[in-house]
Amino acid sequence: MQRMKRGISTFPFLLIFSLIAGAVILTFFFGFGQDLLGLLGRYNSLSLAKNIDQQLAAFTFASHAHNVIPFGKKADVSVSCSNGESIISVDDQSLPTQKLILAPTVLRGNSLRAWTLSWDYPFKVENFYFLFDDDVSYFFQDTLQGKETYFKTTFKAIKNDISLLSSTLPHIKKIIVLFRDSNVNYFNYPHVLRVVKIDFRDKKILISTPSENKEFTLLGDPLAYAALFTQSIKDYECVQKEAIERLNTLTELHVLKTLMLRDLTEDSCLYDITYLDELKSQEQYPPLTYPDAAQNLEVYNKNLELANCPGIYLQ
């Protein structure tokens, strides 16, 4: 065995070895701790997304309800739509859900507000869920008539920080709501996210952003409110398409029910599937016929009940 030369101490070598070993151990545990914190953060974010989804599930049977959903921590929450599914994103974690959910922007804070509306067209099809906070303000066209006044009043009961376009447009995030044409280019004003024009007479919705615009058929009030809460034209189009597919599925079931009632009831009850066929999304019945088809079916169902015949659906 070789011995250290006389006069040379082993202490410096032991010290250097200890420092290197300590640095390696410290680096390991620091990295492990960072990974653990990251894992816990992702778990908490995913748990929060699941909690939001579960809180919304409590609204499923409500036709109109709103509530505050607390987080217990600060978080960034956003909603998107892809392939018929809503995606709830909390920080860097995402949760797909079958619920039709929209939010106007990324929601940052310790809580958010939620509002649900039942889409009856004319029978109940689905609930729409809207998530929002106080970061975005809404500015409505000044002169309102009939249905427009009701629409604004209902919206104000949920989100009371709305103003008229005659007031000064402050430097805050805002969405402009129109009911008639306007010669003003509102995107010349700062922080205008979207301009939504709702035409109740012709049953159309026009959603505009600084880079694009697209027109949709107005399929009931919930889809009009959905236009105010969507973050993008793409999300609105995705949600509307999925809603129509669910409408078509339920319409097929009502067709089967109508045929069954025709066989089981007296001849005095005149059951006809014409109005249900009009409601289905087929090439010969493009979406623009939907509003009239839904109204016709509602009148037909009421007439059945007036004739003491079982209705196709419950009013």
Image (tube, helix red, strand yellow):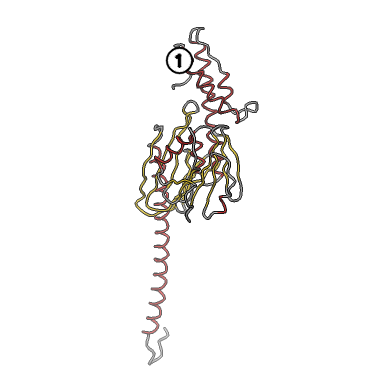
Crowd tier of the residue under label 1, counting other residues whose Cα lies within 10 Å: few below 14, some 14–19, many 20 or above: some
Q: Quadrant of residue 50?
A: top left
Above or below, 4 relative to 291: below
Q: Name the outermost residue toward the top.
A: 267
Above or below, 257 relative to 205: above
User: Residue 17, image x and y in percent?
Assistant: 40, 78
The answer to which of 270 and 152 lies nearer the viewer is 152
Above or below, 1 relative to 145: below
User: Residue 265, image x and y in percent?
Assistant: 48, 9
Label 1, on which residue? 305
User: Quarter of the image containing the C terminus?
Assistant: top left
User: Residue 203, image x and y in percent?
Assistant: 56, 33
Q: Name the outermost residue toward the right.
A: 284
User: Residue 245, image x and y in percent?
Assistant: 55, 32
Residue at 53 percent across and 29 percent down: it is 247
Q: Quadrant of residue 82?
A: top right
Residue at 51 percent across and 26 percent down: it is 250
How many marks can you see? 1
The answer to which of 77 and 231 lies nearer the viewer is 231
Q: Name the outermost residue toward the bottom.
A: 7
The answer to which of 187 and 285 lies nearer the viewer is 187
Q: Is residue 50 left or right of residue 239?
A: left
Q: Amino acid at mark 1?
A: Glu
